Image (cartoon, helix red, strand yellow):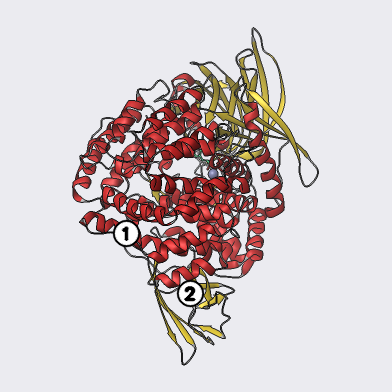
Amino acid sequence: MRTESGRIIHLTDYRPTDFVLERVDLTFELDPTETKCTSRMLFHRREGAAVDAPLVLDGDELKMTGLLFDGMPMEPGRFTEDNDTLTIRELPETAAFEITVDTVINPEANTQLMGLYRTNGIYCTQCEAEGFRRITYFYDRPDVLCVYTVNIIADKESCPLLLSNGNFLGGAGYGEGKHFAAWFDPHPKPSYLFALVAGDLGVVEDTFTTMSGREVALKIYVEHGKEPRAAYAMDALKRSMKWDEEVFSREYDLDIFMVVAVSDFNMGAMENKGLNVFNDKYVLADPETATDADYANIEAIIAHEYFHNWTGNRITCRDWFQLCLKEGLTVYRDHEFSADQRSRAVKRVAEVRHLKSEQFPEDAGPLAHPVRPTKYREINNFYTTTVYEKGAEVTRMIATILGRDLFKKGMDLYFERHDGDAATIEDFVKCFEDASGRDLGQFSLWYHQAGTPLVTVSSAFDQAKGTFTLALEQMVPPTPGQSAKEPMHIPLRFGLLLPDGSEATPASIDGVEVTGDVLHLTKRKQVATVTGLDARPVVTLNRDFSAPINLHFERTPADLAHIARHDRDLFARWQALNDLALPNLVEASRNARAGTAIAVNSLLSDTLIEIAADETLEPAFRAQILALPSEADIARELGSNNDPDAIRAGREAVLAFLASEGKALFATLFERHDGKGSFTPDAASAGRRALRNAALPFLAIADGQPARAAQAFADSDNMTDLSAALGVLAHRFPEAEETQAALETFRARFAENALVLDKWFAIQATIPGEGALGRVQQLMQSPHFNAANPNRVRALVGTFAFSNPTGFNRLDGEGYRFLASQILQIDPKNPQLAARILTSMRSWRSLEGVRAEHALNALRRIAAGEKLSADVADIVERMLN
Ligand code: PHE
Ligand code: ZN
């Protein structure tokens, strides 16, 4: 089976291997149920390693059929094989030696989608984090880098295409109906970056000329007939390659770069050297089937995987505790790329919304862990939003603290110093210290302390002296395993707005270090004193979300409205409006629960309507202004004893008020941007669609009937507008005839396109209220559903559990019981998928008593499951602790 359940791996246990692996030659003879793999590895004993140290290789569910030492069968007494290791003794003290391992693999039976598996007739591998050990015995750890030669033998007809990492060496026929291909990757790499793909696929080809003038062949492989839908991914790839040259001076380093789209994949995509493997959802797009959000995701993920070539592959991680070294940094890079390709402020708003809705709850619950953890039981469970998104924010803060030029200098030093290394977070931070001369010791706590810091601020103005004081206090809440925390280095971008909206330039600021527009908070309590002001300023704090914190700053609605109207930082304007709306929504939810009257601050509705109507602002930004804090945002703000039904009721009342106040405007926005005409996926056109589709739900509320949304559905000529209209119909008028008809039209039109039907599943899974569970259960019986495909399971079961607060958190606990039985059914087949979906219950302790009790029982039922995977056991136990 998998890693012994219960065994914990500690960062402090790290030590290098006893042997150095110089090179490996792999030969695969592919067969659906009996693939033969031969691995020849050249080793020598590491200098300083004990002379009698054995060679211990990793394995997982392997069937070994041969073992050679320097070409001769190994005597039985010299090796032992147990569940997950192969141990070989009596090896040479200094001389190099060759070990050959033969294994037999059953790709067809591999439902975990780790190691070598088959998806839609295609052979494909997934090795990160510990999948290579399911192919052969190996030093399956990121600090063992070597060069790979790969020979693939397969049936010519069913597998015309034979791919692996690096450059193509050659190929030829190979006896009756077979052929072979050989690949060589000159760049030393760890096993998790190995990949093999074989099958019959269509291809889209292009080329890219690098900054030093080398021509690189670009190939994107997709199912036959889907080639036109890969055009946008190819365009995004070329833009990514260019951007990395311009912004990070990084050039591609092989003659060929390949992307393969597969339909069964546990994650988004994988950065295997020269041969990226993608979930097809993040490759395929055309106007008829993809939304603007799909296009944006494809662009971001193509870029992300491409950027890994330098941040991840050329410089990799010493061990899996350093995962954020490649992931946090690469997410930061893809964020910057998208910001440059689109609207920076709108992109930042979307990032912060995502961070707050995904990472903040993780950091506030039982699964909280540092960006650089110190222990894990199952590494698969650490591909988290904390490692990825908070890791990206930590990188962004380094850039904020050092400034653009020193950050670039630090990055250049990192590439220069660590190219070819398996590095650590300490190595990374040291490059910025050396490049800038700035001590980042305290800053590094961001990697080590879990929990979202809370910064509490109060201010006072002395008119007579013209001084303004800002008292700041920081607190990092306790998290599992970390009860006491040190104060952190928190960089806060700020500005002082005057009554006319212009910005004050103070004579001096004392008590807190200031560089440019950044206030450096470093102590538990600090007071900043600003002098030389004629009028009371309105402080705008944490502009651009310069630090990933919770900010408690008692400000009047008038001050917030002032920022929302005037700040030069668009992000800060959105944030101020959000800060104005949230207390109102919280109050409304409390009133709904108590059965008392709900009032809406007219400053909120006036400001919101004014900004949404402002034609000088880009439509995409105005669309973000119209998207009020979500039910989950309100739940997080309330913190405990939550009743999702009351939260929804309160929010709905506020929406209804806004809908009636702004009806005229919403109608104008909706009609003006009618979305028809020839579709282009660019950011400006997407923004116009976003604004129209942000207005539609308000209109539907004001109308109280489905006609307008039904008309919008009928009129749509692209997937963005079509799915938006279907969403409004389903969520606002689930029982209406128009809705039933639209759902059926959509299903019939896209019956052959599983990725589009995922939207159909997701829209129905998020219809609020008690009825959702029954709908989900019924949809699971649909012929379009496939419990073995991760995308289908996520679209239906995952979306229901993660994104339908009232439907999932039913008072009778049926939602949790359903999830428990699903987890127990998915786990034996695909533990990673089961564990991931189970994290939807991570905030169960913040529910009110009756629901929390039901949730607890469901978790206990999972924990009591027989033969739980390490993945699910780890998550459920942490959630119960
Ligand atoms: N390394 C991949 C990425 O971030 C994610 C991934 C992890 C994919 C594990 C598969 C398995 O791009
Ligand atoms: Zn990544």
Looking at the picture, how far across and down is residue 274, in whole percent? Answer: 65, 36
Q: Residues within 10 Å of mark 1 (few under 14, many from 20)?
A: many
Tell me the amino acid under the disc marked 2.
Answer: Val
Mark 2 vs ligand 2: CB under 8 Å?
A: no
Q: Is residue 267 visible?
A: no
Rendered position, 321 above or below 437: above
Residue at position x 48%, y 82% in the image:
536
- Position of residue 25 in the picture relative to residue 588 (left or right): right
Mark toward the start of the polypeptide (1 vs 2): 2
Tell me the amino acid under the disc marked 1.
Answer: Val
Name the residue carrying label 1: 586
Which of the pair 209/179 is nearer the observer? 209
Which of the pair 615/511 is nearer the observer? 615
1 vs 2, front mark: 1
Asked where in the image residue 747 lies, by quadrant, the reply is top left
Which residue lies most toward the bottom here? 464
Label 1: state its secondary structure: helix
- Position of residue 657 in the picture relative to residue 592 (left or right): right
